[in-house]
Amino acid sequence: MASSRFWPSSGVAIVIERLGRPLEQPIFDELAIIGVGLIGSSVARGVRRRKAATRIVLADRSEETLRRAQALVLGDETTSNLAGAVRNADCVILCAPVGAYESIGRTIAPALKSGAIVSDVGSVKAAVISALEPVLPTHTHLVPAHPVAGTEHSGPDAGFAALFINRWCILTPPEGVNSDAVEKVYALWEALGSHVEVMSAAHHDLVLAITSHVPHLIAYNIVGTAADLEQVTRSEVIKFSAGGFRDFTRIAASDPTMWRDVFLHNKDAVLEMLGRFSEDLTALQRMIRRGDGEGLFTLFTRTRAIRLGIVAQGQETAAADFGRRSADANGARLVRSSASDDA
Ligand code: NAP
């Protein structure tokens, strides 16, 4: 598990969170990771650091990505042959955009060995089960997972071993799946520093729709609207971008392929939450039009309490950290936080 140290200085504390020592016993003999981008390369780095697998095989469709993975020494073998990559794997983790899962599943299915665990990191879960369950052989175990951690960057250079420290990882095993397989995937994410929770895929999708998917949609929309405003030139948008807008631009810089797939594969939950969001937005509009200061104040007080709750649970720092890329190369995450957090 991760360890932390504090250095209180003039009003600011630096917290260094590190992955723990290598495990005494690897969880898997051979782990195959398909898709060596931000998340796949972070998993590979974390697994190597903690020796959670004896051997790591990395597969990707892009030769350039595989060359980078080799140069960064992220695994023991790199290949563009997905079926070959999984042949001896005890566990396979799909780390590509979810829209590619079904075709990847079909490609690897004939090569999977008996008892192999197939997991993933996709940001939606019901669609992942619908895509994979019908194409995977019955002698394998499907244990979907979603690490609720990330940045707006992509590719193998963007990953870092400490990405998952202190973050949640949600497992959504389909009913009746082998419990040993679930325990192994659970142990893997704990080894990467995550807190792990198990829930149904449908519940995951609803929760993530409001906490992650709709916020991303709002960010894409607000940045798109600002860019389209006729009277505001592009340079003014950039020049006067205040804190709020800047935060939105960071989120709106997230990978277009990944997020297109998220919205196409969590349609129902996102539309449900968007409907509620629109109703609340209309209510806010009314408050502004009617000069209902008390209504606005009450709402803003409630929302501030939610932010404070998130900081108190260690899921965010109180200090501004627009980049979120607070990590070093040695599997440590540097987190700035104001001294008042320590009280
Ligand atoms: P990424 O940095 O773009 O990496 C994805 C990698 O998968 C790329 O190297 C891509 O190759 C490769 N790929 C795409 N299609 C493939 C295929 N058919 N076969 C083999 N490799 C393929 O994306 P990411 O941010 O790591 O996201 C990966 C997954 O993690 C997604 O399912 C996403 O929902 C999930 N996730 C992301 C975040 C986040 O914040 N980014 C957080 C949690 C979970 P190309 O470069 O050639 O496209």
Image (cartoon, rainbow, N blue to C red):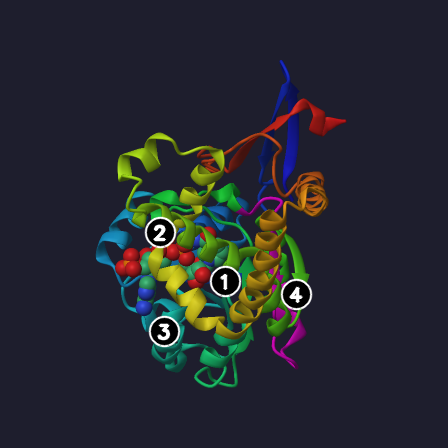
* CA gap, disc 2 and disc 3: 33 Å
Ligand 1 within 8 Å of disc 3? The answer is: yes
Q: In the image, what residue occupies the spot 28% across and 54% down? A: 66
Mark 4 vs 2, N-terminal side = 4
**Percent coordinates x, y for residue 259 in the rendering:** 40, 60
Asked if residue 84 is positioned above or below residue 335 in the image, the reply reads: below
Kind of residue at badge 1: Ser
Q: Could you tell me if residue 34 is visible in this image?
A: no
Q: In the image, what residue occupies the spot 71% across and 39% down? A: 312
Q: Quadrant of residue 343?
A: top right
Q: Is residue 60 magenta?
A: no
Mark 2 vs 3, N-terminal side = 3
State ligand 1's quadrant.
Answer: bottom left
Q: Which residue is mark 1?
A: 123
Asked if residue 200 is positioned above or below residue 56 in the image, the reply reads: below
Q: Which residue is mark 4?
A: 183
Ligand 1 within 8 Å of disc 1? The answer is: yes
* CA gap, disc 4 and disc 2: 43 Å
Q: Is residue 176 magenta?
A: yes
**Percent coordinates x, y for residue 225 in the rendering:** 37, 51
* CA gap, disc 3 and disc 4: 24 Å
Residue sitting farthest toward the left? 63
Magenta segment range?
Answer: 164-184
Q: Which residue is mark 3?
A: 104
**Percent coordinates x, y for residue 174 in the rendering:** 61, 78
Kind of residue at badge 2: Gly
